[in-house]
Amino acid sequence: MPPKGRSHGKGHLEGMDSPDMLSDDGSAFDLGKPPARPIDDPSVLTIGIMADTEVTLGFLLAGIGFHRDNNCNYLMTDDDMPLEELETFFEQLYRMHNLGILILDFPTHKRLKSMLDKCKNMLPVIVVVPSKATLVPYQEWKGRKHIHEQDF
């Protein structure tokens, strides 16, 4: 005989979601509802990305993307994109109060070099990643940069 207050079968705590995402009657929860908006906690840092389609999609699949209130933390770039559009989006990301890391692919980094030289804030940390098409030039650049740093 089960303890008082418990019924036979699957255990259920009132007011708690089922771990298997089934309601009491065994049907799936209503997935048509929009997900709850994450709490904008100023102590939580986000990640921004400006890269080609393949690199950006990879990071989006990893879960770093958001699109809220006409703002998003990613931009899929290509060689034909106007520099002004890149600079505008970069400034928008750079001024975000909760951006901790900004990921740039190598071609975007080269195009934004003059703006990046002016950035003096500790955050966001700028991380340059190679794309499939720019792996060899990226490795050469990284090697030259490493040799230059050893000279100092």
Image (cartoon, grey):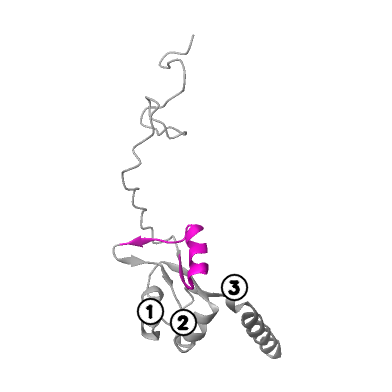
Q: Amino acid at mark 1?
A: Glu
Q: Is residue 130 visible?
A: no
Sequence order check, earlier mark of 3 and 2: 2
Q: Which residues are magenta?
A: 47-68
Residue 90 lies in what quarter of the image? bottom left
Residue drawn at x 45%, y 15% is: 8
Residue drawn at x 33%, y 38% is: 30
Kindly report the distance in space between the C-alpha atoms of the residues bearing marks 2 and 1. 19 Å
Sequence order check, earlier mark of 3 and 1: 1
In this figure, which residue is indicated by the disc labeled 2? 79
Q: Secondary structure at mark 2?
A: loop
Mark 1, Cα crowd under 10 Å, few <14 / some 14-19 / many 20+, is: few
Residue 149 lies in what quarter of the image? bottom right
| Residue 61 inside the magenta-drawn segment | yes
Kindly report the distance in space between the C-alpha atoms of the residues bearing marks 3 and 2. 14 Å
Q: Position of residue 41 (x, y in %)?
A: 38, 58
Return the residue nearer the eye: 138 or 97: 138
In this figure, which residue is indicated by the disc labeled 1? 91
Q: Is residue 53 visible?
A: yes
Q: Going by the image, does 54 lie left or right of 28?
A: right
Q: Position of residue 22 (x, y in %)?
A: 41, 31
Residue drawn at x 45%, y 87% is: 118
Q: Going by the image, does 62 lie left or right of 6?
A: right
Which of the two discs, 2 and 1, sits closer to the camera? 2
In this figure, which residue is indicated by the disc labeled 3? 132
Q: Amino acid at mark 2?
A: Asp
